[in-house]
């Protein structure tokens, strides 16, 4: 399962990075919807990372 979580984290981070780089191409502030997408991705990334850390701790005990 750890491999699947790692792969998911990579995909989420890549998508978030793509959105951020696309926003950087434009002058001015990004649209709220784009900011919301980045923030939502950050929340999911944190949740997946926490799940992975919990599984790692559980497997070591």
Image (spheres, helix red, strand yellow):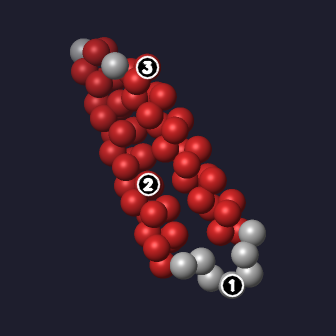
Please give the name of the residue rendered at 25% of the width and 21% of the height, measured from the top-left corner. Answer: 58
- Residue 61, percent across and down? 24, 15
- Asked if residue 31 lies left or right of residue 61, the reply is right
> Is 61 placed left or right of 6 in the picture?
left
Report if the CB atoms under discs 1 and 3 are less than 8 Å apart: no
Q: Is residue 18 left or right of residue 27?
A: left
Q: CA distance from mark 2 to mark 1?
A: 22 Å
The answer to which of 22 and 52 lies nearer the viewer is 22
Which residue occupies the extreme top position in the image?
A: 60
Task: Give percent across and percent down for residue 13.
Answer: 54, 45
Query: Could you tell which of marks 1 and 3 lies nearer the N-terminus?
Result: 3
The secondary structure type at the circle numbered 1 is loop
Front position in the image: 21 or 56: 21
**Residue matched to label 1:** 28
Mark found first going from the N terminus, 3 or 2? 3
Residue 41 image label: 2
Would you identify the image quadrant in which residue 19 lies? bottom right
- Along the polypeptide, which appears first: circle 2 or circle 1? 1
| Residue visible at 36% across and 39% down in the picture | 48
Kindly report the distance in space between the C-alpha atoms of the residues bearing marks 3 and 2. Answer: 20 Å
Residue under the point 48% across and 28% down: 7
Q: CA distance from mark 1 to mark 3?
A: 39 Å
Identify the residue at horizontal 42%, vertical 46% (top origin).
45
Residue, disc 3: 3
- The local secondary structure at tag 3 comes to helix
């Amino acid at each position: 399962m750890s491999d699947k979580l790692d792969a998911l984290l990579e995909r989420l981070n890549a998508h978030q990075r793509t959105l951020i780089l696309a926003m950087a191409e434009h002058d001015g502030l990004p649209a709220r919807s784009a900011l919301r997408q980045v923030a939502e991705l950050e929340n999911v990334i944190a949740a997946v990372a926490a799940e992975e850390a919990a599984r790692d701790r559980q497997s070591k005990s």
